[in-house]
Amino acid sequence: MWVARTIATRRLLLRPLLPAHAEEMAEVLAGPSLYAFTGGSPPSVTSLRARYQRLADGCPSPGVHWCNWVLEDRSQHRLLGTVQATVARTPGGWGAEVAWIVGEAWQSRGYATEAARGLLEWLASPPREVSEVSAHVHPAHGASAGVAAALGMRRTGELVGDEVEWRVELRG
């Protein structure tokens, strides 16, 4: 149920993330502005490959599922970012924390919103039926706040580290 499968949107294919994506994704994630709100610096191919292998191996915590995708432009067959969901049981069923990142060259074109919307539709569909989704957005990151708002998420006012939690219920 929680194995990432390819998700098709109008312009994108969300493909399950694999260690083999590390080389191309290192180029996508090379833009220094991507780390303005999260800190850090662009990853090397080696560190990214190791990280992707850990993600592919799955979460070591029982009952927590990691689902990760690379975003492929359907017309150019080029990777341009990632989306991810960490899924766990909640008192109301299943909940997910989601995140997205799009390389500098592809920003401001709606790719993050399109990919995240495709992810939320996948999470809400049977047999998964995730009922609540959250995202953590730095308060100064207007673009990510715009993505969260476009997904129907609302600011909760709760802080997780230095980020604001946004939340949406996917079904009654």
Image: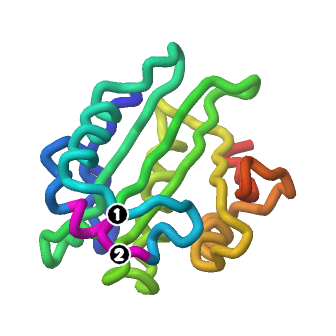
Mark 1 vs 2: CB contact within 8 A: yes
Residue type at mark 1: give it: Pro
Judge whether 34 appears above or below 118 on screen: below
Magenta span: predominant SS is helix
Residue at the image point whose x is 21% and y is 44% from the top: 49
Element under disc 2: loop
Q: Residue 52 appears at what percent x and percent y?
A: 28, 41
Q: Which mark is residue 42?
A: 1
- The answer to which quarter of the image holds residue 90 is top right
Foreground residue among 104 and 15: 104
Q: Residue 118 appears at what percent x and percent y?
A: 43, 58
Q: Residue furthest right?
A: 157
Foreground residue among 109 and 163: 163
Q: What stretch is highlighted in magenta?
A: 25-32
Q: How many labels does the image show?
A: 2
- The answer to which quarter of the image holds residue 91 is top right
Judge whether 125 appears above or below 43 on screen: above
Q: Does the magenta stretch include residue 133?
A: no
Q: Distance between the Cα atoms at labels 1 and 2? A: 7 Å
Q: In this view, does 111 lie to the left or right of 150?
A: left
Residue at the image point whose x is 33% and y is 38% from the top: 4
Judge whether 158 appears above or below 64 on screen: below
Q: Residue 92 appears at what percent x and percent y?
A: 74, 28
Q: Name the residue under label 2.
A: 31
Q: Is residue 28 magenta?
A: yes
Q: Is residue 96 left or right of residue 85?
A: right
Q: In this view, does 142 lie to the left or right of 115?
A: right
